[in-house]
Amino acid sequence: MFETWWKECVVYQIYPRSFQDSNGDGIGDIPGIISRLDYLRWLGIGAIWLSPIYPSPMKDFGYDVSDYRDVDPVFGSLEDMDRLIAEAHERDIRVILDMVLNHTSDQHAWFLESSSSQDNPKSDFYIWKDRIPGNRKGLPNNWYACFGGRAWTFSPQRGQYYLHSFLAEQPDLNWRNDAVVEALFADIRFWLDKGIDGFRLDVINAIVKDETFRDNPRMIGPTPRPYDMQRHIFDRNRPEAHAKLRRFRKMVDEYEDRMLVGEIMVEAPGEPEKAASYLGDGTNELHLAFDFTLLSTKWNARAWRNVADRWYKAVPESGWPCWVLSNHDMPRAISRFGGDVGKAKLAAMFLLTQRGTPFIYYGEEIGMPDIKLPRSKFQDPLGKKYWPFHPGRDPERSPMQWDGTEYAGFSDTSPWLPLDTAHESLNVSSQMDNPASLLNFYHALLALRNHDSILRLGTHRFVSSSCDEVLTYVREFDGVRELILLNFGRKAAVCALSDAPTGSTMDLSAFRILFSTDGKTGGSMNLLDNGRCLLGAHQGLICRSDT
Ligand code: NOJ
């Protein structure tokens, strides 16, 4: 449908365990996803990204892969994946897989072999180090694992430490070994040959470690977690990673129309310039990279503008931004907004009117909140280790709320994580019937974006608003302008706009309302004297001027 699908379509992240169960085991699966493709098509989604579906001991719920070329039986089979690809493509929906290339499971055949002795064909596939007599229990350096404890675990069988940036069951691969890179690329080709359209690359900025394993400098961190008390300059973001990604891009470019989007793990609250550096010159490394700064930015027009402005400036001229409000690792947007649907609509309007590829996390379109669950029900290793200081990531991974029945239409049995208690009223089915619902708002906004090349491809520039609470910008394509106004305030706001370079007050009379958070289209803006306009509380407008 679009010329460059990964620039123009809206991507929807599915956490497969929680989307749709088809076989009554309380865990979502691939046939379940297939059964919901028509819904996604209706919503206007152009691509789905599946969190990992490969065989895994599930210590980190699939982010510990034991075989890159198969599907875990809990999710289905390779035949199911073939069917998903075919059925999604039939509906003009692309399929993106999560690829976890920084580490494998400790049950991956490579690690079983590598850990068996110091002398085997895979001995150099992981990062092994001798004990250093006399210091810190002989640990090779001061690095910590993200999920607790030191980043080094001793293998008695092999008589050496191995490195793991996350759980001890997730040993880090040795990307300095060419045989590892070749083996991973072969696994990636396996999926490219099957017709997978792209990959979301897990912590891709961590793949190369410091050659001499220098200690990370200590710092006062945002949390007391030992991992957060270090600057990760030697275990992440090594300059050599860029050459690996250029090679990766070349390989993927052998196939037509494929895409790589990277998760770039940076210091809180965000380092957009670092994230953008993995786009290379905009054409030779990743196609897209995530900047997560917005996920921890307070609700404030100025703050959102600053974050967006910095991200736009960071992305290279020939590169392309992408935008995200929620994912499987962070509290959901609506919960950060205190459950306020007005804010959720405004945030959706922000997300879907930026220049760049928008990513939606499953359930975001109905305002699914984080669930509260007792500690006895915790599944996530992070929550188990760091509660109460970190609640873990279970709250944002609860089952999709399809309808108001006992198990929300997700399953016909008790699901692997509890359902949100409000699912009886907050669900897809009830929102479909309500024209003013968040779901119908998303649906209409996606339809607009999918038909409006200005929103998809137009240039973007901020314009100054005389009111601090109102964020305003112009998108422009082929001489046609669209003006977006977002009132972040709880009260009505009056503002005049001035556009660079003249700085003179913008004439708003030429603009007609194309889309509004209150459902009104057509007509002119609510204009007052002296070029000012009036916006309601949390009102957002998309307006077009043909002149
Ligand atoms: C980032 C993923 O998003 C997260 O869910 C996972 O636990 C870690 N990487 C380790 O793979």
Image (tube, rainbow, N blue to C red):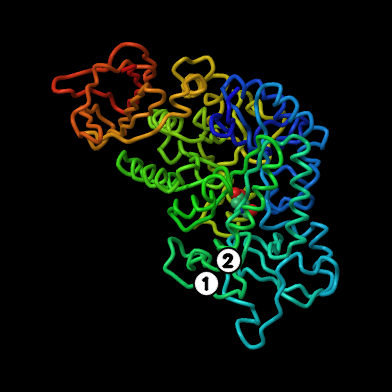
Q: Secondary structure at mark 2?
A: loop
Q: Which residue is mark 2?
A: 235
Q: Position of residue 257 (x, y in %)?
A: 65, 35
Q: From this view, report whether residue 141 is shown above or below residue 222.
A: below
Q: Is residue 75 visible?
A: yes
Q: Nearer the viewer, residue 68 or 318?
A: 318
Q: Nearer the viewer, residue 2 or 526?
A: 2
Question: What residue is at 50 percent from the left and 42 percent from the top?
Answer: 319
Q: Secondary structure at mark 1?
A: loop
The C terminus - image quarter: top left
Q: What residue occupies the far top of the structure in this picture?
A: 523
Question: Within 8 Å of ligand 1, the CB of disc 2?
Answer: no
Q: What residue occupies the far left of the structure in this picture?
A: 530
Q: From this view, report whether residue 437 is shown above or below residue 233.
A: above
Q: Quarter-wise, where is residue 113 in the image?
A: bottom right
Q: Amino acid at mark 2?
A: Asp
Question: What residue is at 53 percent from the left and 42 percent from the top?
Answer: 372
- Disc 1 or 2, which lies upstream in sequence? 1
- Marks 1/2 in contact by CB < 8 Å: the verdict is yes
Q: Which residue is mark 1?
A: 216
Callout 2: 10 Å neighbours few (<14), some, many (20+)? many
Task: Say left or right for 539 vs 477.
Answer: left
